Amino acid sequence: MRAPDPLFAFRDPSSLSTHRNPERAKGSDFAEEVTPQGRFSLRALRIPDDIAIIHAWVTREYAGFWGLTGKSLGQVEEAYREIARTADIYLGFFQGDPAFLMESYLPASHPVGEHYPVLPGDRGMHLLVAPAESPMAGFTWAVFRVVMDFLFSDPAVKRIVVEPDIRNAGIHALNRRAGFRYTKPINLPGKTAHLAFCTRENFASSVKSAADAGGNTTTPPLRATSTQTSPISHLRPEIWREVNAALIRKAISEFAHERLLKPILSGGDGPWGEYFLCGDDNRIQYRFRARILALHHWDIQTSSLAKTVAGVEAPLDALEFVLEVKGQLGLGAEVLPVYLEEMTSTLYAMAYKRDHQALSAADLVHAGFQEIESAMTEGHPAFVANSGRVGFDANDYLAYAPETGAPIHLLWLAAHKHHAQFHGSRDSSYEELIREELGDDTVAAFRLRLEALNLHPGDYLFIPVHPWQWFNKLIQVFAADIANRDLVCLGYGEDTYRAQQSIRTFFNLSHPGKRYVKTALSVLNMGFMRGLSADYMRDTPAINDWIGDLIRNDGFFLEHGFDILREVGAIGYRSPLLDGAVEKKSPYRKMLAALWRENPVPGTRPGERLMTMAALLHRDRDGFALLPQLIQASNLDVDTWLQRYFRCYLAPLVHCFYAHDLAFMPHGENLILLLVGNAPVRAYMKDIAEEAVIMDVNRPLPDRVARIRADIPENIKLLSLFTDVFDGIFRYLAEILSEQAEYAEERFWDQVAMCLREYIRTHPEFGDKMRRHDLFISEFPHSCLNRLQLRNNRQMVDLTDPSGALQFAGTLKNPVGDLIRRD
């Protein structure tokens, strides 16, 4: 494939930069390109004449990765005089106005050259786009292409090298769009960076692909300038107003659902009413239009939401809302500050998603598995503060949040066998698993690093860790273990991963057929510190084997397309100091562990595709839901589509309950659907060992499986279906279909009832149990999720006693309870 046609018109070819001519250009603009956006030109930076211009750029917060924030004019000038010793620096113009800064350097004279074998024709590049006053769609990409065209206009340049900060998610997306191939993380002065290369052929191919696609790619469209890379670029007034209104709408809906707030009907007719809600101070009122659906679900029109203070209209602010109703919510002094931080983080994430959402609901119908995964906006639908991630800073968010889609390389440690243990499934050994995950070359390299320290590799286990966990927790907390060589940092692995919705689980982008990896991550998110228990790792594979056997030896599950993704290997590290100092449930004992989970991708056949079940609840930034689009694309009517969905999801969960006293945590993030013709035919359950429960206390279980047995009161056992499925998933699906598919809510619940009746009809052997645990009971206890978080947002539930902490608010009317049970 040939390189792109030259696009630059050089006014004085002899005055080009030092990579062509030793004499640095002194004249006016010397290179120019005309693009659909307008005219771009470059000339050599003039020091000190141009310093005031770039000082205004590099000292702003959005340019934090350049390391000059807060520097004086003189300090910036001194910095660029130093840079100019080893690099060519260019000032770029758009329509004659300064618009970007580009540095070009020889890798052999730069620290990056110590991390790879430099080839003739390699050229390094740094790029900064000025902050935009008037954003222009596609501008940043146009600048990037201009710079690439310029560098490749020199026939001596064969390959462009970049080393962006590993946390700079925006520039990673831009690099990938241009054709850069990421290789590995490297440590450079002041940063951990990704090393990436782009050849002429890579760039030409990427430009052609974008052109063939009409300029559209699956990469999220970039904003007008490199403020895309800034952690605050999405915090703009218009977006902030939108997400605050959306979060208040959700807060009123969910808190009213849990009967913490009690809106008062003031008018309206038919299903829609006009409501008002008073704050703890009655002068504060919120007014809105809503309808109340089954399961006391409040469907509120966001556009109708308005706030007044003493009769005067006031702006909508979600944090103020929490403070205004904190008495009604029962928020105590200890919980309130953390909850406000979780709400702020949730708003921050909502703003990012709204600003960067590239794919509409219609686009997602045809999107790939991981494109859909990173496009999800809701998280757990019932929780109001559902994206807390307390512990991440803004750059961590860009680098590690699943919605940014940033590539991640995992760090690997060698953990001494005195304190670390591997446990595998019956068909998985440590040696085989590590070789398959790392590859022979990386395993050999890691062993050599240990030998270089005069350590015996056979004494150690290799364990993957999240980069954030290493730099923010493990280095300090396990400093003694590191100093004593009980823990040895081996460096980054070669494979690139992407964080899944659960944030601490990773999908392998380099080898999509490899296993998922789950690591400990000590950030506070939605009522839990997201660690991973070394104690739990001991039994995790055995539990998965046992449940896997149960599922795969029962013909009902095979017939209905239901299976689990086993956690087949687990490693846990126990610090001898911490183990004796803290209680077993302490987060300090959940800082260093990892597990590997089966991946459904290798078993997917032509014509089949995978999708997180959370996608069924997804709405795009314009409010359009994916579910109706999927149904339309399937060419099935809604009844038939739902029947297929219930067959592989609801019916197996009912069978788990009646046949095996088994319950999972079957929310959207924990299910992967396999679709054929855009309709579900299989369901894969994941997160098995931590969230599965056997509710029969008398059932004999192997020693290593006994942990999942729990004594659940008889009257709440069916909440594993009523709360987790009916209330946690189906009430949202019913709303979406009613609103956007003109599918009556009553009809949805009738389809649910039909599925349940069919199971009852075909399984008379469970008749006694079905009468004791009646799915058609008129009402059931209302177990409330937000009440858990509002009561204790550091540990909502003790996993060893899953029913002990439940919070109830009366009962909910069963939406299938008044439907006649008929054969």
Image: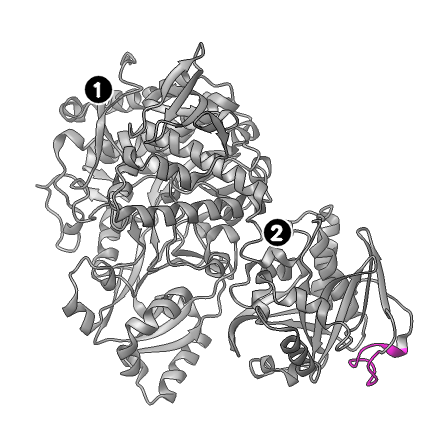
N-terminal label among 2 and 1? 2
Q: Is residue 647 visible?
A: no
Residue where numbered disc 1 is placed: 777
Say which quadrant the N terminus sits in.
bottom right
Q: Please tell me whether residue 18 belongs to the stretch shown in magenta.
A: yes
Disc 2 is placed on an element classified as: loop
| Figure quadrant of residue 623 | top right
- Vertical comparison of 299 with 183: above or below: above
Q: CA distance from mark 2 to mark 1?
A: 49 Å
* Residue 233 x/y as whole percent: 58, 53
Tell me where the magenta segment starts and ends, as one range.
Answer: 14-25
Query: In the rendering, which numbered label is found on residue 88?
Result: none
Nearer to me, 101 or 471? 101
Asked if disc 2 and disc 1 are in contact, CB closer than 8 Å, the reply is no
Instruction: Single out the residue that lies furthest toward the left.
Output: 698
Q: Main secondary structure of the magenta part?
A: loop
The three-letter code of the residue at mark 1 reads Ile
Label 2 packing within 10 angstroms: few (<14), some (14-19), many (20+): some
**Residue 788 image position (x, y, % from top left):** 25, 40
The answer to whether residue 596 is above or below residue 78 is above
Where in the figure is residue 812, as x and y percent of width and height? 26, 23
Is 775 covered by the magenta stretch?
no
Q: Determine which residue is flagged by label 2.
A: 219
| Residue found at x 33% / y 23% | 296
Residue type highlighted by circle 2: Thr
Q: Residue furthest top?
A: 269
